[in-house]
Image (cartoon, helix red, strand yellow):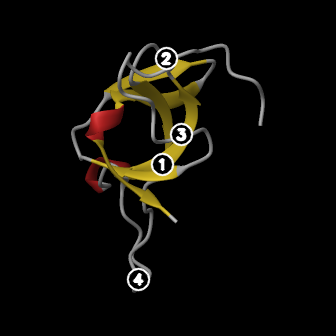
Amino acid sequence: MAELNIQPLADRVLVEPSAAETKTASGIIIPDTAQEKPQQGTIVAVGGGKKDEPMTVKTGDKVLYGKYSGTEIRFEGKDYLIMKESDIFAIIG
């Protein structure tokens, strides 16, 4: 994985969303306009945390987050989400 030149601040994390499902279990292809936004992804950068609240997630963790969590950004041709650590519901083990 290439080095990213983004460093989130405080309690924010940068997440690379997983790819959206393009086909149903029965093989029906889902058009782009009907695809659900993914609600899981991989953390690619982590901020330093707040003064009395260290970060509990780390780079490389797979996480679940809310459907409308974070802000979508595009950096060097890739889509990412930047969100607060509190927007993350769980780490997928």
The mark nearer the N terminus, 3 or 4, is: 4
Q: The N terminus lies in which quarter of the figure?
A: top right
Q: What residue type is labelled 3?
A: Ile
Point 29% across, 54% down: residue: 36
**Cα gap from disc 1 to disc 4, whole angstroms:** 21 Å
Element on which disc 1 rests: strand
Element on which disc 3 rests: strand
Q: Which mark is drawn over residue 41?
A: 1
Q: In this figure, which residue is indicated by the disc labeled 3?
A: 43
Point 49% across, 17% down: residue: 8
Q: In this figure, which residue is indicated by the disc labeled 2?
A: 8
The mark nearer the N terminus, 2 or 3, is: 2
The mark nearer the N terminus, 2 or 1, is: 2
**Cα gap from disc 4 to disc 2, whole angstroms:** 37 Å
Q: Residue 7, how many percent across, how many down?
A: 57, 15
Please rate how many residues cluster around mark 2, counting C-alpha atoms within 10 Å: few if below 14, some from 14 to 19, many from 20. Answer: some
Q: In this figure, which residue is indicated by the disc labeled 4?
A: 25
- The answer to whether any part of residue 91 appears in the image is yes
Q: Mark 1 against mark 4, which lies toward the viewer?
A: 1
Q: What residue type is labelled 1?
A: Gly
Task: Judge left or right: residue 88 versus residue 45.
Answer: left
